[in-house]
Image (cartoon, rainbow, N blue to C red):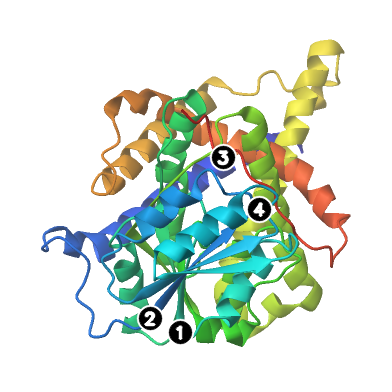
Amino acid sequence: MLDALTAFSYYYPLFMAYLWIAGAVFYYWRFERPRAGAPGGPPLLGAYPLVCVVVPCHNEGPQINETVACLLTSRYPNFEVVLVDDGSGDDTRQVLESLASRHARVRVIHLARNQGKAVALNTAALMTSAEYLACIDADALLDPDAIAWMMGHLLASPRVAAVTGNPRVRNRTTLLGRLQLGEYSSIIGLIKRAQRTYGRVFTVSGVVVCFRKAALHDVGYWSPEILTEDIDISWKLQLRHWDVRFEPQALCWILTPETLGGLWQQRVRWAMGGVQVVLKHFRFAHIFVWKSRRMWPVLAEYLLSVAWSYAMLAVALLWLAGLVVELPPEFQVPTLLSGWAGIMLGTTCLLQVGVSLALDSRYDATPLRHFFWMIWYPLAYWMLSMAATVVAVPRALFRRIKKRARWVSPDRGIQA
């Protein structure tokens, strides 16, 4: 029994890494490579319908000016910006009003108290005439061509409900910042490519995504009680048989946590949101009908990752216990990382980082000096995910179902 548990703990992440690598390489070969030799710039669209860029704001006074200034440089010709002040307690209201008074494209919506990001998004969706919504975070800098790249998919097929972009880390001055720079390439970007290859994605990136409003209306918009509105809306859309795509050229430059506390809080929230979404669809059995079969691999991957987290926890606890007391032979774990497993993990991490950097080199010329720190981040990512999942599952299980998912300003790194 312990041998099986140990084998699952060691080799499940290896299997998933190679599955992601294979899927991402195929995605590149099928979708990105044909565009590599084409002239630069976004696709020329047959029409340019109005796009509403929605920016939910909660205590965003220090950075929202930069975000809006970047948005206004967009080369998509027909867009408006809707800034939703979600009950901020700082000077956000005054800053937003000043922006609206100076820029004709900018409108402001004020919510009297903090209702959560989902409510802010729902409010903006219902108060714009635009049939397409580009949603970004208030600290994100959107590439001038990102809207056009995402709209290319939405206009090409009426079944496309959402197009998620390619977030890139812009704070790279600390070790945690550099590690997450690697994560967004070797983990997140790789997974999105692979999942698109295999049919369905676990989640869009809430920091940069464009939606068809008709699809949002079809599924009832965002759910206010879910901590991760991006995971929830992704599942709702795909379970209604809408298509969700990934566009690596829709770039968005983001700030990431650069303290251990901030990173931990972010990952626990992400993990709790994932558990909430899965429990929600288990409760209503939406995912078990034959029409939802294309979501079954996504569900299986998620459930296996949760099982792996608890298996790895059990192995680690047995190893720690063995350092203190003499355990029966059948429960002894001599080391957490055997020689062969260590070689395999190291080789896989090198391959995964190398492939991911090669795929993303067209979009983000990552400095080579960061490569050393990226080598082991896939392993650290698994450990962080394991700990966050172990903590998140009981929290999500005992969280009140209808409790509103309000937010606080996240850790945005060490600012100069």
The answer to whether 73 is drawn above or below residue 200 in the figure is above
* Res 304 label: 4
Q: Are marks 1 and 2 in contact (CB under 8 Å)?
A: yes
Task: Identify the mark nearer the N-term, 1 or 3.
Answer: 3
Residue 332, image quadrant: top right
Residue sitting at x 47%, y 24%: 174
Residue pointed to by mark 3: 11
Q: CA distance from mark 2 to mark 4?
A: 42 Å
User: x and y percent of residue 219 in the render?
Assistant: 63, 82
Mark 4 and mark 3: span between their CA atoms?
A: 12 Å
Question: Identity of the amino acid at label 1?
Answer: Glu
- For mark 1, what is the residue? 131
Residue 296 vs residue 200: left or right?
right
Q: Nearer the viewer, mark 1 or mark 3?
A: 1
Secondary-structure class at tag 4: helix
Mark 4 surroundings within 10 Å by alpha-carbon count, few (fewer than 14), some (14 through 19), many (20 or more): few
372 left or right of 86 in image: left
Who is closer to the viewer here, 288 or 210? 210
Give how far apart the Cα atoms at labels 1 and 3 are.
Answer: 46 Å
